Image (cartoon, helix red, strand yellow):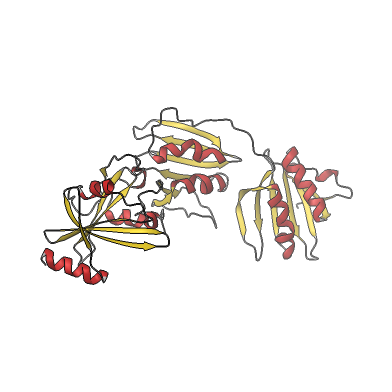
Amino acid sequence: MTDEEIIERLRRARGRDLTPGRIGRHRVLIDTISLPAGVVTTVHRVRDGQVTVVRASAGSFRDDVAEALLDVPPVPPGSVQPIPVDLPGLRLTHALVLSPEPNDETVAVVAVHHSEVRPGEPEKTFRGSISSHGTGLFHHLNDWNRRPIPRADARLLDDWPGGMMRRSAKLHPWQAERLLTRVAPDGPAAVRVEIHDMRGHVLVLRRHWDRGVGTLTFPSGASAPIDLPRRDLWAALGPVFRGEDLRGLVTDSPGAPERDVLEMRYQTEDRGWASLPVMEALDSCVARLDRQILRTAGNWAVFTSRSDAVIQVECTEDGELWLETPDPGAESSQGRVVSVPEAAALLEILAREDRSAVADLPGVQTVAWA
């Protein structure tokens, strides 16, 4: 197909004439559409029977960015090869040539950040990584003003029944920030997640009470222990995944212990379960008593403090709340039926004083395990 035939086909596909123009040394056809989310500008370069397209959404078009993308030389198909782009005010750092789809002559050139792509990976892998099942970058790819969406490839090393991830031998793409603000900090105790950045760093993390602990291995093979407050993981380790200078990186910090939190396991007939201990705010633990535990006979929950003091509750056949604390040394438990306010007061002591006060209840019973 000649260049003139391709241009005519583009005009028919768009249903309107495209505006001829020049960007740098490139003769192009420009199409502009106004949408509620902003102006979308599409630039077509037709040359030697092939169409190269660059597109800017949300009113982000800039001539200098378009010129830099069009200047990118051809690259061998099959793998992604980011080409550095350095322009004032542009957060994105590289241009990426995406191969045409089958039976199509169109090559797309997009702007990306170095934290979003693994150089040399198969293009199919990259396309999958930016989909809705990965980082979701696909939906923002043409916004040249956007902030980078650092990617991390991750897998679980231990089972997490019912969790946000499954144990896998294969790495899966995630938004790095989500991994370090939701998955790793909120996961069960002792479940390890292995997280890879785009430069060869490998982070293995597990939650230990209110902290994230593990190891960061550098591309050189050197490693550093990780021991950080779980809510500080992204602030401290974000530079690794954003591809920044790591001088001064903090991997060990005491931080302030979290207040009013407990680890919890639970089982309900109609409101889910957690067979491994997750961390919950005290208010949330108390709210579960009415909303979940007391809904159905047999529903139960186990609450644990920082030093492993334990209170467990269960809905009885009569719809009452049985509360007890185990005494493994005596192979027995101490407990009795309580009201929700009584249970809430005991959970408050468990969280704030790190002890079980069940033995202080009037009328408490001792129940032998055998």
Along the line of sight, the residue nearer the viewer: 105 or 213: 105
Give x and y (percent) for residue 241: 41, 41
Asked whether residue 365 appears in the rendered view, the answer is yes
Give x and y (percent) for residue 4: 12, 66
Q: Determine whether, in the image, residue 6 is placed left or right of residue 264.
A: left
| Vertical comparison of 208 with 122: above or below | above
Where on the picture, by quarter, is residue 258?
top right
Give x and y (percent) for residue 298: 72, 63
Along the line of sight, the residue nearer the viewer: 154 or 43: 43
Asked whether residue 330 appears in the rendered view, the answer is no
Residue at image point 43% right, 53% down? 168
Give x and y (percent) for residue 11: 22, 69
Q: Residue furthest right?
A: 362
Q: Residue furthest top?
A: 248
Q: Determine whether, in the image, residue 275 is placed left or right of residue 3.
A: right
Can you say which quadrant of the picture contains the N terminus? Answer: bottom left
| Vertical comparison of 145 with 219: above or below | below
Q: How many marks?
A: 0
Q: Determine whether, in the image, residue 28 is placed left or right of residue 34.
A: left
Residue at image point 31% right, 58% down? 41
